[in-house]
Image (cartoon, rainbow, N blue to C red):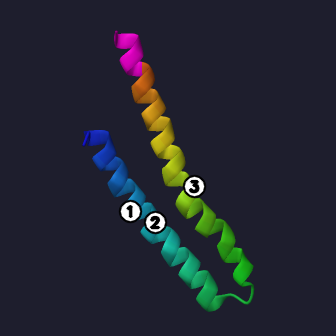
C-alpha cells in the first residue's frame, strides 16, 4: 500500500469519526433530525472525493513522467 493511501485512510477515519459525532449530537439534541442528513452525506462523500482527486493526480503524474 502506498504512503498516500495510508495517509488517506487516517484522514478518512478521522473524518468519519467527526462526522459520526456531529450526526449523533444533532440526532440527540435537535428537534429537527433531518439536519443530520448533510453531515452524514459529507461524512461519506468528502473522503471518497479526496481519494479520487489524489488517485487522478498520481495517475497524471505517472503518465507525464513516462
Residue at position x 39%, y 63% from top?
14
Q: In the structure shown, which secondary structural element does the residue marked by tag 1 occupy?
A: helix
Residue at position x 54%, y 46% from top?
49
Can you identify the residue that label 1 sits on? 13
In the rendered structure, which segment of residues is drawn in magenta? 61-66
Give the x, y percent position of residue 27. Answer: 62, 85
Give the x, y percent position of residue 48. Answer: 51, 50
Q: What distance separates the C-alpha of mark 2 from that of mark 1?
A: 5 Å
Q: Count neighbours of disc 3 (C-alpha within 10 A) and say few if under 14, some if 14 to 19, many if 20 or more.
A: few
Give the x, y percent position of residue 60. Answer: 45, 21
Q: In the structure shown, which secondary structural element does the residue marked by tag 2 occupy?
A: helix
Determine which quarter of the picture holds residue 42. bottom right
Can you identify the residue that label 3 sits on? 45
Q: Is residue 55 left or right of residue 10?
A: right
**Quadrant containing the C terminus in the rendered view:** top left
**N-terminal-most mark, 2 or 3:** 2
Give the x, y percent position of residue 43. Answer: 54, 63
Q: Are marks 2 and 1 in contact (CB under 8 Å)?
A: yes
Above or below, 65 relative to 28: above
Residue at position x 61%, y 67% from top?
39
Can you identify the residue that label 2 sits on? 16
Above or below, 1 relative to 42: above
Q: Is residue 9 left or right of residue 26?
A: left
Counting labels gives 3
Q: Is residue 54 left or right of residue 66?
A: right
Q: What distance separates the C-alpha of mark 2 from that of mark 3?
A: 10 Å
Amino acid at each position: 500500500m502506498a504512503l498516500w493511501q495510508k495517509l488517506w485512510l487516517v484522514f478518512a477515519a478521522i473524518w468519519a469519526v467527526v462526522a459520526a459525532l456531529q450526526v449523533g449530537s444533532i440526532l440527540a439534541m435537535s428537534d429537527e433530525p433531518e439536519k443530520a442528513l448533510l453531515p452524514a452525506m459529507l461524512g461519506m462523500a468528502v473522503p471518497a472525493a479526496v481519494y479520487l482527486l489524489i488517485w487522478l493526480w498520481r495517475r497524471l503524474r505517472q503518465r507525464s513522467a513516462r
